[in-house]
Image (cartoon, coloured by chain):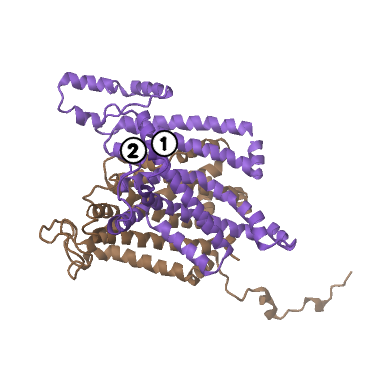
């Protein structure tokens, strides 16, 4: 087990290094960065200093070494478009916004999804089952950007129940200002509802057909007891594997949801940096987002082996 | 010991020879799958809907005979009417023709991407599973590294480097997508490799390439079909999302994503400009997903009761 963890940890570090390197060289190949647009009208010597400041006067390989070194020291670079904004300050300012949105979406989406999944599996073949299955496939087939725009139009525009734009600031950053977060959260959570309802339903139906469930029933347990003690517990394993994927969905989903509702979070900032070709910000943020993603997968992998004994044995042998 | 007498060698009545002939026609795996699919009304409906959509993307842009490319300053932002069935956009172009044109581009992009994903995934996964050992180990590590990154990030970065064009979009979306296919193919082939008929082929001296193409791939077809059914809608999705973020095709080209993104700009005043492209997108994706579900039920023997 410990050997497995260490091996995974080393792979993780190596993966991060590869990602940082690949991103750096990809960005070095970007035609025309934000700096050249900014420096166009400036006198020659200021232009030179500006390039020097961002280290863009040096050859690519030298820049690569310098960037990697400073990343190791926790310095991820400074924005070209907005002077003074560093990657760390952006993460500090915008990270919580995205984190709150993501957490709200996942909590609501996953819990509602699981509930619907259990319902659909227990009431298999009834109208509840069909309703859940139909809703799930509709939710999966409608892109969240269409959902977002629709909600914005109906509840924000026509009915004016919720504000279309804005986000809680200051003291209300984590709690409060709920009216701003309702529509974005709803938009983002549909995909979780659909995924988890479908997933849990299939996996529960799988478990219900197992022999140990038959044994439990023949021992005289009530249906509720069987479902609670045997079926639900065992059908949660595929759900656990889906969770790290959901974090990925959350990160990439935030690009769209934040864009639709103009939420000042990481996703919106990242997309703007990409379209503005703000290379140093893109590099830093890519590495950080990728790191976050990889670490989450690493942790869930380890937790997963702890929870499911069958995998622990296999992992231990390796 | 029984004695061999003459009457022991009498001719047997010939009708006894066909006793073991199977009188019912044998149903092949594919025939069976097709039969199951035909019984599923939802899947057949979505198949019909898809065929209709594909026909419409071919002839749809020309039904009205209107020019949907050049700007028409006089007839802009007209609501749905007899002349413009879906209305006209902010530059006076017929939205009905544009929606089908956009759907054509979106579907073609999705199909090309899926083809690339399947081909690359098959070759990579096949090689990985067939050779095993160190080759497998190294190739698996590469896969792990690629899949451990959010794929949209890679797509965005690649789009940032390349100029906006259909080719660049296809490339950017395919960069990471083949990994899942490769992994599934590897798993399936690992199972097949142990089977007797592959051993027989090896004993007869078939080359590795021949075994992969002739024996492995036909047996992994059902996985591939399911892969196609789930990949096409997700590519249509990704294209629309990227164009929406302004990172996909540029706003002069026509695709569903571009139309939605243009429609969003005028959403408050002319909602139908957003509604029709979004509706077309949803219907196409929904039809693909429903058909994919039906195919899964038809093709996966484990789901049968």
Check the residue under mark 1 and report the chain it is in.
A
Residue positioned 60% across, 53% down in the render: A235
Foreground residue, B224 or A267?
A: A267
**Chain A pictured colour:** purple
Q: In which quarter of the image is residue B104?
A: bottom left
Front residue of this view, candidates A238 and A192: A192
What secondary structure is marked by label 1?
helix
Side of A123 where B112 appears, left or right: left
Which residue does the numbered mark 1 point to in the structure image? A289
Q: Residue A161: image x %, image y %?
A: 33, 56
Label count reads 2
| Labels 1 and 2 touching (C-beta < 8 A) | yes
Query: In this figure, which residue is indicated by the disc labeled 2?
Result: A270
The residue at the point 59 percent across, 33 percent down is A5
Residues behind callouts 1 and 2 on a single chain: yes
Q: Where is residue A248 in the image (x, y as percent from the top left)?
A: 45, 43
Q: Can residue B294 be seen in this view?
A: no
Residue A60: image x %, image y %? 32, 24
Numbered tag placed on residue A180 in the rendering: none
Camera sees residue A228: yes
Of residue B51 and residue A40, the one placed in the foreground of this image is A40
């Amino acid at each position: 087990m410990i050997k497995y963890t260490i091996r995974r940890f080393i792979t993780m570090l190596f993966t991060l290094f590869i990602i940082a390197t690949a991103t750096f060289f990809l960005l070095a190949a970007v035609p025309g960065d934000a700096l050249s647009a900014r420096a166009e009208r400036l006198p020659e010597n200021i232009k030179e200093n500006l390039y020097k400041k961002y280290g863009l006067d040096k050859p690519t390989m030298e820049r690569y070494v310098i960037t990697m070194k400073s990343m190791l020291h926790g310095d991820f670079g400074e924005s070209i478009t907005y002077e003074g904004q560093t990657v760390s300050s952006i993460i500090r300012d915008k990270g919580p916004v995205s984190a709150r949105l993501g957490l709200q979406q996942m909590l609501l989406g996953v819990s509602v999804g699981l509930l619907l999944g259990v319902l659909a599996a227990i009431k298999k073949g009834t109208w509840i089952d069909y309703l859940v299955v139909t809703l799930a496939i509709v939710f999966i087939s409608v892109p969240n950007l269409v959902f977002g725009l629709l909600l914005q139009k109906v509840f924000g525009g026509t009915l004016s129940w919720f504000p279309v734009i804005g986000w809680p600031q200051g003291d209300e950053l984590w709690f409060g200002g709920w009216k701003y977060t309702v529509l974005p959260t709803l938009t983002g959570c549909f995909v979780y509802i659909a995924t988890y309802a479908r997933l849990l339903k299939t996996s529960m139906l799988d478990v219900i057909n197992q022999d140990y469930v038959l044994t439990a029933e023949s021992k005289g347990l009530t249906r509720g007891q069987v479902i609670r003690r045997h079926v639900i517990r065992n059908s949660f394993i595929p759900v656990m594997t889906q969770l790290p994927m959901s974090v990925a969905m959350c990160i990439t989903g935030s690009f769209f949801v934040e864009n639709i509702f103009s939420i000042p979070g990481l996703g919106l900032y990242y997309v703007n940096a990409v379209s503005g070709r703000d290379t140093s910000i893109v590099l830093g943020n890519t590495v950080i987002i990728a790191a976050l993603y990889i670490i989450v997968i690493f942790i869930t992998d380890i937790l997963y082996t702890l929870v499911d004994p069958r995998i622990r044995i296999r992992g231990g042998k390796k | 010991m029984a004695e061999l007498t003459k009457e022991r060698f009498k001719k047997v009545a010939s009708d006894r020879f066909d006793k073991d002939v199977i009188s019912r026609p044998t149903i092949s795996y594919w025939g069976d799958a097709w039969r199951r699919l035909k019984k599923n009304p939802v899947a057949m409906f979505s198949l019909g809907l898809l065929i209709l959509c594909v026909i419409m993307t071919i002839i749809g842009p020309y039904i009205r005979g209107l020019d949907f490319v050049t700007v028409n300053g006089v007839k802009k932002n007209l609501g749905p009417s007899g002349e413009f069935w879906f209305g006209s956009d902010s530059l006076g172009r017929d939205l009905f023709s544009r929606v089908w044109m956009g759907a054509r581009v979106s579907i073609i992009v999705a199909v090309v991407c899926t083809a690339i994903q399947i081909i690359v995934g098959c070759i990579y996964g096949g090689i990985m599973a067939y050779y095993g050992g160190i080759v497998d180990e190294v190739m698996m590590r590469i896969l792990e590294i690629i899949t451990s990154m959010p794929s949209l990030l890679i797509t965005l970065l690649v789009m940032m480097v390349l100029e906006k064009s259909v080719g660049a979009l296809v490339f950017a979306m395919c960069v990471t997508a083949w990994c899942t296919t490769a992994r599934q193919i590897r798993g399936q082939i690992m199972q097949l490799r142990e089977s007797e008929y592959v051993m027989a082929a090896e004993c007869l001296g078939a080359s590795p390439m021949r075994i992969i193409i002739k024996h492995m791939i036909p047996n992994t077809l059902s996985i591939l079909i399911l892969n196609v059914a789930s990949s096409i809608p997700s590519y249509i999705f990704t294209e629309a999302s990227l164009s929406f973020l302004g990172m996909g095709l540029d706003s002069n080209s026509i695709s569903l994503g571009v139309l939605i993104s243009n429609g969003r700009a005028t959403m408050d005043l002319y909602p139908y400009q957003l509604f029709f492209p979004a509706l077309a997108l949803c219907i196409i994706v929904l039809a693909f997903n429903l058909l994919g579900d039906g195919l899964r039920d038809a093709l996966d023997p484990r789901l049968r009761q």
